[in-house]
Image (tube, helix red, strand yellow):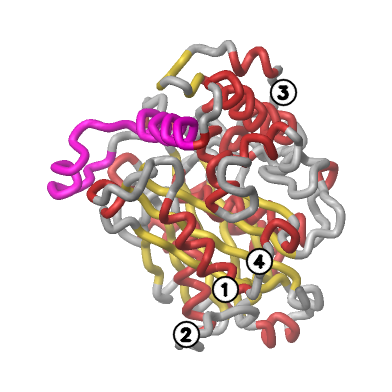
Amino acid sequence: MSSGFRDRVAIIGMGCSRFGERWEAGTAELMAEAFDEALADAGIERKQISAAWYGSGMDRVNVGNSSIPAATALRLDGIPVSRVENMCATGTEALRGAAYAVAAGACDIALAIGAEKLKDTGYGGLPIPWKGAFNDMWQPVSSAPAGFAQLAGGYRTKHQISKQDLKRAMAHVSWKSHKNGVKSPKAHLRKELTMEQIIDAPIVADPLGLYDCCGVSDGAACAIVTTPEIARALGKSEAITIKAIQISTCSGVEMTMADWDGSHVRTTRNAARRAYDEAGIVNPREELSMLEVHDCFSITELVTMEDLGISEDGQGWKDVLDGFYDADGKLPCQIDGGLKCFGHPIGASGLRMLYESYLQLLGRAGERQIDSPRLALTHNLGGVPYLGIACISIIGRADS
């Protein structure tokens, strides 16, 4: 029986570019910006990295579909570099490859990097990727806002929540992220909004308004991982270790089975259950210190709180309104502003979330630092609630 790789991989360096409309930089420059910070943080030389995983989601509007752009941008000479893509979970998928390689003993030090430059495409939202003939037959006409608006409808109907109450809870999610994002110097959007501005904004896909949706952006983030033994040899006495990484991919049953009611995301629940088992977490509401979740839409974050088993089913909207997930609440979520303030350069988002968790665990988050965090969870959700991929990582101090 698999035992996972809890505490067998340490993160010794991370870097993150500034996110935003980076007209002055190409994808290569964004990757170098994140990589240089990570190398300095790890205190190693480039030649000590023996393998790398590069995540990019929109190859047709970016740098192409091979690993060569990462190898050339970062001068990773002669080592194996693999490009991975797994929709919005791409960044965490890159980390999974690097961590698995270290845990398996295939290499000593590995790099995971994710990058995306979407503002140049001219799209206001995500470009429509070619999904392949099979998927285009299954979902010939769909959009991300429409898919998650259906989640809001399913959630509200199942739990008999008034439209006004759910709208207020969704608005609180966005209000909280914008309030937190002001303190993140690398965030794309650093502006507080009022609840009234959010609630009264133009509708994109009912009930989702403009400020219920995250935007696209340019950015890159990366992590350097190794074994705890090598980390200690490098002088990393307070190494952050990976407690769990788990992915769940939809097989299509949500669209074909009548027992899925559209009120939750099945893949997130599957990935969370396995991640808690791997990390040895029994009560996530009490044991986790912070969350960075995939807030592509405000309803996504709200429902995710229940899918992660932190709020009881049908009670997440109340926890949100009670401030449970605020910066000064019991379990801060999106302490850096989340996708709402950083935007969503697909390949980079998962590693950007991990970057914030890493800073917080090491006490380096400046004015947004929370008190004594020990375990942090990040969550990505690719696709739509009825056909997607959920990825969860949990990191923490080695003795947690």
Task: Give the residue at mark 1.
Answer: 277
Q: Which residues are magenta?
A: 129-158
Report the Cα–Cα distance between label 4 and label 1. 14 Å
Task: Give the residue at mark 3.
Answer: 192
Which amino acid is tagged 4? Ile
Decide which of 46, 365 is in the foreground and name it: 365
Q: Can you say which quadrant of the picture contains the N terminus?
A: bottom left
Task: Give the residue at mark 4.
Answer: 395
Sooner in the amino-acid sequence: mark 3 or mark 1 = 3
The residue tagged with tag 1: helix, strand or loop?
Answer: helix
Circle 2 packing at 10 Å, graded few (<14), some (14-19), many (20+), is few
- Count of all numbered marks drawn on residues in the image: 4
Report the Cα–Cα distance between label 3 and label 2. 46 Å
In the displayed structure, 180 sits above or below 59; it is above
137 part of magenta stretch: yes
Q: Residue at x 62, y 25 (%)?
A: 171
Q: Nearer the viewer, mark 2 or mark 4?
A: 2
Q: Nearer the viewer, mark 3 or mark 1?
A: 1
Report the Cα–Cα distance between label 2 and label 4. 19 Å
Where residue 252 sits in the image (x, y, percent)?
Answer: 26, 53
Q: Nearer the viewer, mark 4 or mark 1?
A: 1
Which amino acid is tagged 3? Glu
Asked which quadrant contains residue 251, the reply is: bottom left
Marks 2/1 in contact by CB < 8 Å: the verdict is: no
Which amino acid is tagged 1? Asp
Q: Main secondary structure of the magenta part?
A: helix
Report the Cα–Cα distance between label 3 and label 1. 38 Å
In the displayed structure, 144 sits above or below 14; it is above
Report the Cα–Cα distance between label 3 and label 4. 29 Å
131 part of magenta stretch: yes
Q: Which mark is residue 2?
A: 2
